Image (cartoon, rainbow, N blue to C red):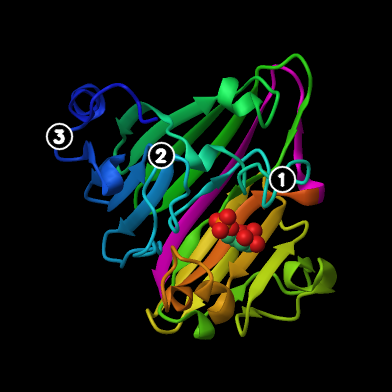
């Protein structure tokens, strides 16, 4: 259910003329559109989902499928889905939504703030009867997206329960590439990873990551940055992070993509998911009343 407040009222309350507008987006979902000198971008209240960021002088950074669904209860295919409080299928309940429930529900728009060179959009969500059917916890989840010459994404969990909370989290970012078959991902050489295409077998990365088939890997103990080289769009995308110990790398390749109605025929060639995350053994535990903030900072440069 979208927020009861009208789009016009939200724009009156939180819009910044010429910089940030709240308007109706795809599927009638409400979005924030950023048009600042440093960058343009878009973020839906549905899933607090960033769907576009284009720093000044650069091309669009994120991929969004032309066949994506745009409706309550279904995740947008592309951009930056937020996976929380579990990653992948729920190991305790096969009927629970994949990647948790926050990417498929409407969030609250809390504020839009203009600083000297950037615009920060703050959204939040929290526990309610709906979430407790899947996860019996009292929590608030804050998300700040700062659109500037770089993009900063901060996901902050506040434990409002009287017991510790343990959860997984991921910014499941679909980075747009000219052709995933010629992209190279640097920064994971020598890192151990679990291969989801091979029953989670543990391997060690040799050199750069190149995509030559279905790729679905969870790189372990990766606190550092990664950088993707795109030989077609002639650019590098760098992802730095804080408080994230796993990096997931995913591309479905042709066969799996054919079974994804919201991806379309050749969509798989145009993105690589590089996911800033804390999953599996790096799941996070937060004491009552405490908080945890995971952050990703994305930058684009020419080759
Ligand atoms: O992050 C990789 C992954 O877990 C893959 O296994 C695949 O399921 C992908 O996420 C997409 O999941 P979704 O539920 O968005 O279709």
Instruction: Tell me which numbered mark, 1 or 2, is placed earlier along the sequence.
Output: 2
Q: Quadrant of the C terminus?
A: bottom left
Q: Quadrant of the N terminus?
A: top left
Secondary structure of residue under mark 2: loop
**Quarter of the image where one finds residue 218:** bottom right
Check if residue 50 falls in the magenta segment.
Answer: no
Q: Is residue 223 visible?
A: no
Left or right of residue 97: residue 63: left
**Crowdedness near tag 3: few (<14), some (14–19) or many (≥20) residues, C-alpha within 10 Å:** few
Left or right of residue 72: residue 247: right
Question: How many numbered discs sit on the rendered protein?
Answer: 3
**Quarter of the image where one finds residue 63:** bottom left
The image quadrant where one finds ligand 1 is bottom right
Left or right of residue 32: residue 303: right
Left or right of residue 34: residue 225: right
**Crowdedness near tag 2: few (<14), some (14–19) or many (≥20) residues, C-alpha within 10 Å:** many
Instruction: Tell me which numbered mark, 3 or 2, is placed earlier along the sequence.
Output: 3
Quote the CA–CA distance across marks 1 and 2.
21 Å
Q: Is 94 above or below relative to 293?
A: below
**Quarter of the image where one finds residue 168:** top right
For the point 35% across and 55% down, which residue is it? 53
Residues at discs 3 and 2 in contact (Cβ within 8 Å): no
* Magenta stretch, residue numbers: 281-303
Q: Is 301 above or below relative to 283?
A: below
Q: Which residue is mark 2?
A: 46
Residue sticking out furthest to the front: 95
Check if residue 298 falls in the magenta segment.
Answer: yes
Q: Which label number is shown at residue 90? A: 1
Q: Which label number is shown at residue 17? A: 3
């Amino acid at each position: 259910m979208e927020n009861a407040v009208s789009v016009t009222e939200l724009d009156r309350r939180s819009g910044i003329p010429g910089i940030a507008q709240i308007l109706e987006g795809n599927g009638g979902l409400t979005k924030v559109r950023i048009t600042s000198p440093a960058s343009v971008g878009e973020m839906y209240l549905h899933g607090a989902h960033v769907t576009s960021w284009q720093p000044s002088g650069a091309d669009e950074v994120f991929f969004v499928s032309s066949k994506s669904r745009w409706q309550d209860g279904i995740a947008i295919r592309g951009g930056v889905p937020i996976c929380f409080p579990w990653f992948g299928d729920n190991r305790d309940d096969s009927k629970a939504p994949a990647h948790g429930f926050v990417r498929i529900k409407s969030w609250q728009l809390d504020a839009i703030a203009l600083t000297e060179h950037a615009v920060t959009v703050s959204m939040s969500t929290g526990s309610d009867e709906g979430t407790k059917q899947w996860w019996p916890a009292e929590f608030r989840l804050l998300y700040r997206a700062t659109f500037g010459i770089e993009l900063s994404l901060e996901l902050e969990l506040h434990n409002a329960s009287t017991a510790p909370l343990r959860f997984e989290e991921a910014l499941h970012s679909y980075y747009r590439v000219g052709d995933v078959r010629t992209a190279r991902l640097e920064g994971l050489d020598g890192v151990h990873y679990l291969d989801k295409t091979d029953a989670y077998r543990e391997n060690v990365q040799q050199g750069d990551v190149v995509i030559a088939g279905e790729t679905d890997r969870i790189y372990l103990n990766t606190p550092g940055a990664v950088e993707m080289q795109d030989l077609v769009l002639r650019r590098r995308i760098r992802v730095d992070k804080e408080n994230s110990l796993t990096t997931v790398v995913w591309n479905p390749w042709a066969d799996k993509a054919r079974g994804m109605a919201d991806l379309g025929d050749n969509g798989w060639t145009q993105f690589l998911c590089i996911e800033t995350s804390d999953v599996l053994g790096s799941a996070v535990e937060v004491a009552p009343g405490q908080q945890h903030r995971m952050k990703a900072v994305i930058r684009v440069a020419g080759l």
